[in-house]
Image: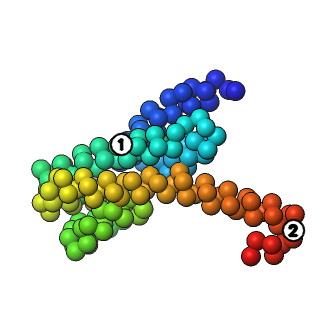
């Protein structure tokens, strides 16, 4: 096996933790493909699926807690900073505050699945005065769901799809329907 691949496998949890943390802090990284790849590697027995999920959730919680605390301590200036990179910075702040205020609980749980929205959830929760414990619980639930979907569900769908393709080759086109 390639020594670089062995090194990545040997330190897989560390790489995954750092990538997830840096992505949650704000670097433009794509963690989802890494989590999917880690799930595939876990399927081969080289990483633990539970370890992948724990590392990803922990990194997400730390990164989101940083934004929560910034929102709580710095208020709207943090949201304005995040909205500067959006297409409509002026309306971004107002719309984000309004949307999260009305649906804070579901927003924290589901925000990780919507690109660009997940980064706003922490600061808005902090600005709204949500208790830290409640934020950590709801955000942790969202992080857990996100961490479960990508290493488990997507490889499972891909596996079923490949099995269906094999069955089609063997039994004919309509055999999977």
Q: How far from the left and from the top, in percent, is residue 78?
A: 20, 54
Res 56 quadrant in image:
top left
53, 112: nearer the viewer? 53
129 with respect to 67 (left or right) = left
Q: Identify the residue shown where x is 61% and y is 38%.
A: 45
Res 82 quadrant in image:
bottom left
Quarter of the N terminus within the rendering? top right
Element type at mark 1:
helix
Q: Which numbered disc flags the more N-terminal residue, 2 or 1?
A: 1
Disc 1 crowd, CA 10 A, few/some/many (<14, 14-19, 20+): many
Tell me if residue 5 can be seen.
Answer: yes
Tag 2 residue: 171
Determine which of the numbered discs, if any, sits on residue 59 in the image.
1
Q: How far from the left and from the top, in percent, is residue 165?
A: 78, 63
CA gap between label 2 and label 1 equals 46 Å
Q: Identify the residue shown where x is 58% and y is 57%.
A: 154
């Amino acid at each position: 096996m390639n020594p670089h691949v062995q090194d990545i496998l040997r330190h897989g949890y560390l790489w995954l933790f750092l990538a997830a943390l840096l992505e949650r802090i704000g670097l433009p990284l794509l963690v989802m493909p890494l989590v999917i790849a880690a799930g595939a590697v876990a399927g081969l027995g080289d990483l633990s699926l539970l370890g992948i999920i724990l590392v990803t959730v922990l990194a997400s919680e730390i990164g989101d807690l940083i934004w929560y605390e910034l929102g709580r301590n710095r208020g709207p200036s943090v949201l304005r900073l995040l909205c500067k990179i959006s297409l409509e910075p002026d309306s971004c702040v107002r719309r984000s505050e309004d949307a999260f205020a009305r649906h804070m609980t579901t927003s924290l749980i589901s925000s990780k699945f919507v690109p660009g929205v997940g980064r706003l959830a922490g600061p808005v929760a902090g600005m709204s005065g949500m208790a830290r414990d409640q934020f950590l619980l709801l955000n942790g639930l969202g992080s857990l769901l996100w961490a479960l979907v990508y290493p488990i569900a997507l490889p499972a769908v891909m596996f079923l799809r490949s099995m269906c393709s094999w069955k089609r080759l063997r039994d004919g086109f309509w055999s999977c329907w």
